[in-house]
Amino acid sequence: MKTNVYYVAHSFVECENAANQIQSKNTFENLLKLDENAKGIFLGNKGGVRNPFWRIRREDNRFFIDRYDFVNPYIEKIFKLGIIRKNIFPYLFAKRCQSIMRKDGFPKIVYIRIDSPEEGICYIKNLDRLNIGRIFFEVHHLKYEISSFFHWNCEYLYCKLAYERLFSLARKNSGRVRIVSLTEGLARMINSMVNVGKIDVVPSAHDLYISQPKEINFNKRRIEIIYVGLNFRYRDVETLIQAMNYLSDKFYLRMVGGKVKERDNLTKKYRSLVKQRRLILEEPAPHSRIREKLMNGDIAIITLPSQGISFGASPLRLFEYMSVGLPIVASDAPCLREILTKDSALFFDPGNSQDLARKIKYIAENEKEAKRIGEKAFRDSKKYTYFERAKKIYELIST
């Protein structure tokens, strides 16, 4: 009997303003190359005041559940409840997804980029009703680990208990429910909470298909340190900025991305570096221009804190840096060590701006070593394209 494949993500894939949007869009597009009949369900951004979260649109293999996003931040601001945006809205999205699936009478395999534990619980409770043979939950983080997501301790405790319930239900239904993680570190965290058994790891990816690595040349008047990120929060970017105080005027830092408020705050705090043109803060570039930005850089930096997201993060910029062949200096964080090695990057102590400055200086003074590191990262990046990511997912759902 025919089995339909669904790829589901609580993401506005019609935009490219966040990593989850870029990743979800590219993953599904490449999954279609392997199964042209696969169906995708995503958030849509064409909702209105009269239908803030309910209208369903269909475009070819894609369904969009339109949500009027204007209400989201204001609800949280007024009521001071993070769970409305982080837990309840994903649950409502799951209910609308299920209304689509119920109209499809065929058996289903469902792969979900899960955004909250309530989403997963909602699906597990309705496996038979939805005629789901197997379901895969791709977990990107445990939200209770990120303190700024919530306003009250009770929200934190509620979210933690919800994850425990989700993973307990997954264990009880292990024949039909599988957990997928972005990193080995996150997989270990999940199993330390509830032992769900084998967790498959599917890292992030890139879509910058470049035939030759960037040519490294430090024999120039100024050297550009490049940092790209759609969001500066939780990324320890100030360690990078402060490292500029330990480097000569030959170096300047270009930071592409961040929110308007984040860039404004950094501009005020580091006014002297900005005035000297040693710190250049640019608004996020369209995803189509990221390659150009990286090709103009000389040394790429990835900063992450020693705790929190450093166990579960699989940053898109990591794979984009690698795909260009830039020499990378990275925080010695567990999630980065899963992808990078001493042959494809230089590592510095997280939060230590002096150590970061030393590693940047070493790279600039050893061009041959910089080329070797960049070329190794470039070769390794071929394992992390979106097509390779889609192949891993397709192999999981096909076995």
Image (cartoon, rainbow, N blue to C red):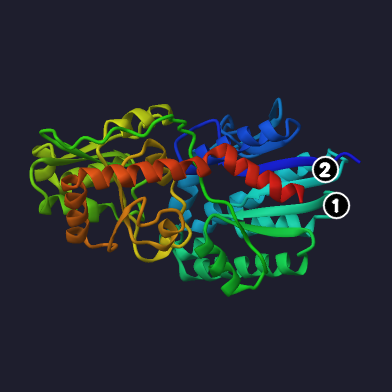
Q: Position of residue 339 (x, y in %)?
A: 45, 53
Q: Amino acid at mark 1?
A: Arg
Residue at horizontal 74 percent and vertical 59 percent from the top: 177
Q: Mark 2 and mark 1 in contact? Answer it, CB < 8 Å.
A: yes
Q: Quadrant of residue 5?
A: top right
Q: Which quarter of the rendering shows the N terminus?
A: top right
Task: For residue 392, say whether it is visible.
Answer: yes
Q: Nearer the viewer, residue 66 or 397?
A: 397
Q: Nearer the viewer, residue 239 or 262?
A: 239
Q: Position of residue 72 (x, y in %)?
A: 50, 45
Q: Nearer the viewer, residue 372 or 125?
A: 372
Q: Is residue 72 left or right of residue 350?
A: right
* Label 2 packing within 10 angstroms: few (<14), some (14-19), many (20+): few
Residue at horizontal 85 percent and vertical 49 percent from the top: 131
* Label 1 packing within 10 angstroms: few (<14), some (14-19), many (20+): few
Q: Amino acid at mark 2?
A: Arg
Q: Position of residue 48 (x, y in %)?
A: 58, 31
- Label 1: which secondary element: loop
> Which comes before the other along the chain, label 2 or label 1?
2
Q: Nearer the viewer, residue 323 or 123?
A: 323
Per the rendering, the mark at residue 129 is 1
Per the rendering, the mark at residue 102 is 2
Q: Is residue 113 left or right of residue 320?
A: right
